[in-house]
Structures are given as structure tokens and as C-alpha cells.
Image (cartoon, grey):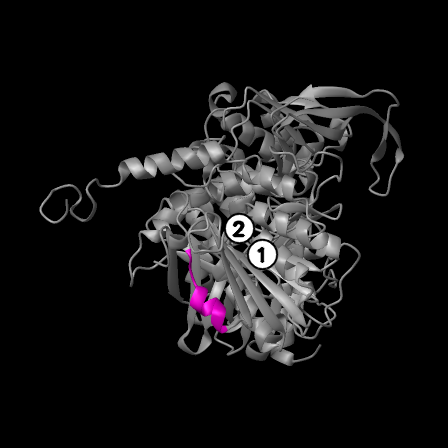
Amino acid sequence: MLSPGIKRFELDAAEIARKALPGQFVVLRVNEEGERIPLTVADTMPDKGILVIVFQEAGKSTKLLGSLNEGDSILDLIGPLGRHSHIEKFGTVVCIGGGVGTPEIFPVARALKQSDNKVISIIGFRSQDLILMADEMKSVSDELIVATDDGSNGNKGFVTDMLKKVIDRGEKIDHVFAVGPVIMMKMVSKTSEPYKIPTVVSLNPIMLDATGMCGVCRVDVGGESKLACVDGPEFDGHKVDFDGLMARLRTYLPEEKLSLEQYEAAKPKGGCCGGKGGCCA
Amino acid sequence: MREQDPQVRARNFEEVPYGYTPEEAVEEAKRCLKCKKPSCVQGCPVNIDIPGFVGQIALGNFWEAMKVMKTTNTLPAICGRVCPQESQCEGSCVLAKKMEPVAIGNLERYIADWEAQQNECVMCEMKPRTGKKVAVVGAGPAGLTVASDCAKMGHSVAMFEALHKPGGVLVYGIPEFRLPKAIVEREVNFVRSMGVDLQLNYVVGKLKTLDDLLQEFDAVFVGTGAGKPSFMGIPGENCLGVYSANEYLTRSNLMKAYLFPRYDTPIVRGKRVATIGGGNVAMDSARTALRLGAEKSILIYRRSREEMPARTAEVHHAEQEGIEFNLLTNPVRYIADEKGWVKAVECLRMELGEPDASGRRRPVPVKGSEFQIPVDTVVVAIGNSPNPLIAQTTPGLETAKHGNVVADPKTGRTSKQGVFAGGDIVTGAATVILAMGAGRLAANSIDEYVRTGQW
């Protein structure tokens, strides 16, 4: 566990670990009844055959995944999917991670650093107790700014406020990469647009097969319909129709709520002992 | 063939026809005239020995009938259910001129289902091992045919499938009520029983490229299908509640969303569902909508009934079940409510003009005929284009305008040595049996190529 509700798993997946590049994702299925869950590749250890995923336990499927223990297995794993991040020497880049987007921006920041960019990283969380991967981000950044919405870490503000500050201090920024909640990526793009700083966002629409077959992840990019699973997931933030994406993400809210309620209701009460008593409160 | 009552079946996912009794099968088989030059065989893309297997059924020799069947077709339970027999074997049957043709499809299905109930199954004759290795990309109808044919010829076959279940369109596209998934599984297992190695969750082009495969295998067959959904590009297509048929059917079939919440993948259970299109996929979608609880399932098709590409049986079944047909009608935009959900589709009336490139009369809009149909769900079933992944990642593989892989229709050979292709990836969206036919031809030329090394 990295922070409340956010978990990091190492998967034994040698072939995918060898091929996956920053910005790509995998799809997994926990069991026969399970959904296909798309998750960004957070890291790879090709020599050990390990693929790292980080996810937030939000709905039934991610909670079910989170309930697995070390040594357990999942039914299906497919990847790497999507196009990888375009990494080159841009000059000075700002890497922005919001919440669970932080572990996803990490491999991108690291690759940019390795390509001799000056990396300024901005990561944002609701409050201090939710901060994650600050040390890792620091290790791949020339400068790291950690912001909290409530100011509990002493640096109050949204990532966009921090981006504005960095821009305002007069430094020339050549590229922005942002991963996080859709609203954050929208605001980041709005912040960088007047300065014409190319901004890459990594989109997380609803996906199904994630191989370009179903079209559910279509998103309007500059008036063209693009599939996030095969044309993305990274797109030009100044062209993405974020409002359309946010609306489509709400398609299954009632079903997601029902699934979660049933899952929570079916879980044994009282934790480890299943409510029988003796080992927990 | 006896069928479930339309009113009942429109609300369940059970298969529509019940299948023959043994007596009914024998009776039907006896109608075959045993023509000297059987035109039915010519009408079949994989040239099944139809008089041969029908003749054995007529004699009550079901085991023998199955033996005949499996020399040319390892997927009979599937073909019997999804082939457009009326334009193939049955359409070519000499009886068809005067009366009902022999129900070849039903007999094919019967004999395969009969075999499934026996304790053992008819094994194919396997040629001695050649030591040659063939990779098959895509475990759909074309790939399964190539895999089983090449295995029979003595080659080692490895099949790579991107999804978590084998079968391609047979598992993600065609619904349970038309092709039970247990049947697909059984026929795929039969192919595997011939020694075919199947790797699921394997995206060729991402994990290994075609060039990587050519290092390991003597030949590669590409049967990745027409998996990319087409949209019309009209306003409102990104509204909530607008599906591609691929998404709608994949949710329901592959992910079993019709069993939500027992299965985790959800699907919108619309009350007024419009399906756009006139092919088999459109019929499947409109009928799935009914089974998911739609009060009205409306089909919108821009041409007239005559031009509908769907199997006659499917159109008939859809009508019986109460699908409302809006023919000569074409959507022009979708209208959303304040939350972004589709609430109506605006259409234009059409009339038929001069024949177009397909030979069918071209639909022309009637000016000023706009009208709206209130809906809460839309399924766009206007076709699919080839999956671009392999072509994008394979230098030297020639493709045509729509991304189709260019392959010789007689041999399946592509522009790249050692690479063969067939099925929807070459032709664009067509039928299961045409893909199987292409697979059969490709398997024969793969055999020739790996034995001789001659390109």
C-alpha cells in the first residue's frame, strides 16, 4: 500500500516487462466474472521479469484486485497496449502528477531525465497523508514541487497553481506532461495553452477490449474522433474535448454503484476472521 | 426445424432453434437427390462433401457422416448455425428451383451436435510430422481453419489471440441465442486436440512483431479480422448511450454483461433502442436489445429490405420477435438530453436511385423529410474496417485503401515472403464461412510453401 486506498503490485510478467515503455498500459482480469481493467504501466524490471502497476481502489473491480495477496494470481494479463510516450530532448519539461497519476507520470519523468531534459516535477494531492512517491519523483527530477489542496504539507494549492508559478518565474518551458484526474488534465492544459507550451495528457476513458475493436474509448481530439487505446492514450491536451470525456466516464455510474454495494455487502464482516471473532475487534 | 416461441425467446438468451430429432434428420436427409454433379458443393466456400455426409445421415450412419464432414470442415456446429446457406449450398441445391432445398445447414448442425453427445469424437487423419512451424495470428474463423488444416498436414501450429478467449467474432460478436458459446469452446477444443498451441492475451504487433514471428516460424498467417468499428461521423455520436455494435455485442457476449451484476461488466439496458444497419450484426444487436429488456427495438436501415445483407433467417427471426423495421431511413444526427445522454435520433427518409458500385440501388435522401425517433440507446452497426495493428508494425506488408492487407485471393500470399493472410483482414467485414474458405486456401499454399520453400 502506498497511501490510503492506493496499492502497488508487482506482477510476474516477463515478456510484457521486456517490451513495455513509458506511457503504455496493460489490461487485466482478476477472474472469470471480472471486468477487463486497464492500468498504466508504472514501472518495469525487465531483468526480474516484473511489471509494476499502481491503482486506486475505487469500484468493485479495483477493490477485488486490491484484495489479492502476495503470491495470488490473476486470470488474464494483456499488454503492452497503446502508444508509448514520445521521449526526446525537449529542454525543460514539467511533469505533473495528480493523486494516483503520480506513479503513472514517474516512468515518463524518469525517461525524460535520462534523455537529458531538465525535469521539473509537480505532484498534487488532497492532503499530506495522501502524498505518494515523492522520494522516487525527487530522484528523477531536477526540482520537485509537492502541493496539497488543503495546504497540510505547507504548500497549499492545485498543481495548476504550481505550474503557473513555474511559468511566471520566467523559465522557458518546452513541454508539459500531465497525468491525473480528467479535470486536472483539463486545467493544466488550459493553464499552459496561453503560453503555447506543448502539453501531453494521458487519457483514461472507459475501455473494453483496449485493442481498437470496440470504440468505447473514443474521444474528440481537435475535431477528430480518436481511440485512446490505440491512437493514445497520450494526446495533445490543447485539442482534447475534456468535457466530452468526463461525460462519457459517467456512463455506468449507477451500475458501478450497484456492483460496489453488492461486493461490500457480500464481504465477510469483521475483517480477518470473517466475523467469527477472536482475532480482531 | 422447431424453434422457441418468438414472444418467449425474445426475452431470453437461449438458442432459437431446438435442433432435429434423429428421425427428423434422417427424413430431411432422404430428400437429397444425390446429383451426379452436386451444385451444392460448388456453392460451399470450403467444398464440404455435402452429398457424402447427407447420404450417411439418410442411412442413419451418423458416425460416418461426421467422418465425411471432418475431412473438409472441423467447425461444423458453427457453420451449420451461421453460414448464409440460402446464398451458398442451399441456394445451389437443385431442389431449390421447385421447392424447399435440402436443409443442409440444419443437417450439418445436427450431425455436429449429435457427435458432441457421444463419449468420443471423430478424430481427423493426421499426416506425419513435417517439423515445419506455422504461426497463426488471430483465433477467429480464418485462423482456426488454417490452424486445423496445417495441423492435419503435419505442421506444428502456434496460434496467437489478443482477447482472453479464442474464437474471434464467434465469441465477441455472435450472440449466445444464435451461437451458444459452449459450442464454440467445443470446436476450438477440437482444434487444440490436434496439437495446436494456443496463446491467449497475446497482441502480435505489441509483444512480438510479425518479423519476430518470421524468425521463429516457417510461415505466418494473419487472420486478425475486421475489428475496427465504423461510425457515420454525424453529430452526436459521442453522446452517452451511443454504442458501436462491436462494443454492445462484446459487452453482452464476451463479457457476459447480460448477466450483470453476476458478471462485473455492465451494459445499458435501454428501453427504446435503435440499431443502425441492415446486416447480421445489426440483427444480432437489435435482438440482443430485446433480450436485455428493451420495450422497443428499432432497426434503422437506409436501403430497402431487398438490399439487406443479413441472412434471411435472421431478418425473419428479428421480425417474428417484434423488431420494428424503419427501412429507407438514415440517421443524420443524435440529440442529447441535458446530461449528455442520447434522447432522439433525427433521420431522413430515403428513396432508391441508380445502382452503385455494389450493384445495389443507391439510397438518396428525400429533401425536407427529417423526423425524430425518441430513443435512449443507439447501436451503430454499419460495418467494421480491418484492425490496423499488424500493418502498422510490419514494414513491407502491402495494404490497400482501407487498411486491408493485400493478399492473393487464390493463395492468401501477401507482399511479404512467408506471410499469408485471409478473412476479414483482407476482404473487409464479410462472413464466417468466407473467412474459413480463405483459411482453407491459405493453408494449402502454406503447406506448399513450407515444404518447397518456393515463394
Residue at 65% from the left image edge and 80% from the top image edge: B453
Residue at 63% from the left image edge and 47% from the top image edge: A186
Q: Position of residue A65 (x, y in %)?
A: 36, 52
Task: Judge by depth and name the residue closer to the eye, B392 or A131.
Answer: A131
Outermost residue toward the left in this view:
A278
The answer to whether residue A205 is seen in the rendering is: yes
Task: Judge by depth and name the residue closer to the eye, B105 or A142.
Answer: A142
The answer to whether residue B441 is seen in the rendering is: no
Q: Which residue is mark 2?
A: A157
Q: Quadrant of residue A13?
A: bottom left
Does the segment drawn in magenta span residue A137?
yes
Task: Judge by depth and name the residue closer to the eye, A228 or B286.
Answer: A228
Q: Which residues are magenta?
A: A131-139
Q: Are marks 2 and 1 in contact (CB under 8 Å)?
A: yes
Task: Judge by depth and name the residue closer to the eye, B411 or A152.
Answer: A152
Outermost residue toward the right in this view:
B354
Question: What number of labels is visible?
Answer: 2
Does the segment drawn in magenta span residue A103?
no
Measured in 3D between alpha carbons, the distance from the residue under mark 2 to the one under mark 1, in whole angstroms, is 7 Å
What kind of residue is marked 2? Answer: Gly
Residue at 78% from the left image edge and 59% from the top image edge: B400
Instruction: Find numbered disc 1 in the image and state the secondary structure of the residue it sits on.
Output: helix
What kind of residue is marked 1? Answer: Met
Q: Which residue is mark 1?
A: A162
